[in-house]
Every structure is written in structure tokens, then in C-alpha cells.
Amino acid sequence: MVPDLEVPFVLLFTGTQDRLVLHSLIGGMTLGTIISIALAVLIYPRLTSAIFPIKKAKVREKCHFSLAVALSCLLGCLSHVLLDVANHSYNPFFWPFLSTYQTPSPIVPLLGGVTMASLIVHGSMAILFVGLFINKRDNFWERLLVG
């Protein structure tokens, strides 16, 4: 979700709800990954243990800085950017080499437009979540949020 952190700031400063640096391939893999690592190590353990019935020590044990956490953050940002290519009519995927509006999604028209593409992507994620829940009911929140 880190790439979406830029949207409120862009809205505040430009008045539009555009996606910029964190939704590009380079921005997501560099700045997005750095922000994700900082959030995962510094904030995620406290927040997760405060909301869900998971011990903070268990979350901290998994969420200390490591290569696995860094790789997970990188893959999370990269997958977000790639999913947004299928979810929005444009994405600044190749920024700064192309402007934000010069990179229309090649996938959205194939999926029937923005609304249908969004329904397909969100429906797929909901089915995946339900499948995970049914398959791993024991300690579900701990397995999902901590691993």
C-alpha cells in the first residue's frame, strides 16, 4: 500500500488524484521499498499488536531489518505498481523516462475498461483472501500478518 501514500499529498498540492513517483517502476522499487522497510520495522509491530491478538514480541521477531523483510517490501511495492497497471487507465510506469500521461495501460482495454478491470482485480483478490482464510483458519491473523 506504500505507493498509495503519495495520493493524498498529490491531491493536496495539485488538486488532482494522480499517481506519480511511487507508482513508477523506478520510484516503487527504490523510494517505495525504503519507505516500506521503515514502516515494517518501526511501525508495523506496534500497530499490528495493538489491533490484532498477536504479541508484539512475535511481530518484532519477524519484522526486524533483514534481507527477507527488504525483499518482501520490494516485492510488495513492485506488485502494487504492476496491479495498478491493470487497474487504472494510466500509470506513470516508466517515469521519469516518459511523462505520467504517456504510459496508458495496455491491459485495461483488454479487460473491458477501467470499471471491469477494477472488478476483475478486486474480485480476484477477494477470492484469494477467502481461500487463504478457509485453508489456514487456525491462527489466521498471525499467519497472515506475521508469517
Image (spheres, grey):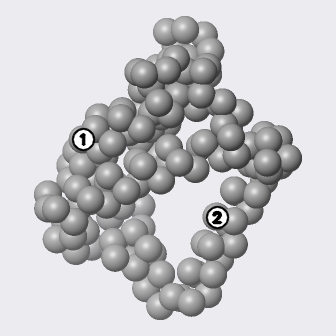
Q: Residue at x 27, y 73 (%)?
A: 55
Q: Nearer the viewer, residue 141 or 92?
A: 92
On the rendered structure, is 78 left or right of 85? Answer: left
Q: From where the camera sits, is residue 6 visible?
A: no
Q: Quadrant of residue 57?
A: bottom left
Q: Residues within 10 Å of mark 1 (few under 14, many from 20)?
A: some
Q: Are marks 2 and 1 in contact (CB under 8 Å)?
A: no
The mark tally for this picture is 2
Element marked by disc 2: helix
Q: Position of residue 8 (x, y in %)?
A: 51, 24
Q: Nearer the viewer, residue 4 or 67?
A: 67
Q: Position of residue 63 (x, y in %)?
A: 22, 63
Which residue has dot 1 on it? 34
Type of amino acid at the residue the image marks with label 2: Met
Q: Residue at x 29, y 34 (%)?
A: 31
| Label located before the other in sequence (2 or 1) | 1
Type of amino acid at the residue the image marks with label 1: Ile
Q: CA distance from mark 2 to mark 1?
A: 25 Å
Q: Position of residue 56 (x, y in %)?
A: 24, 67
Name the quadrant of the C terminus.
bottom left
Which residue has dot 2 on it? 125
Q: Nearer the viewer, residue 78 or 110?
A: 110
Q: Residue at x 61, y 87 (%)?
A: 134
Q: Residues within 10 Å of mark 2 (few under 14, many from 20)?
A: few
Question: In the figure, 71 relative to 22: above or below?
Answer: below
Residue lying furthest top in this view?
14
On the rendered structure, is 57 left or right of 24? Answer: left
Element marked by disc 1: helix
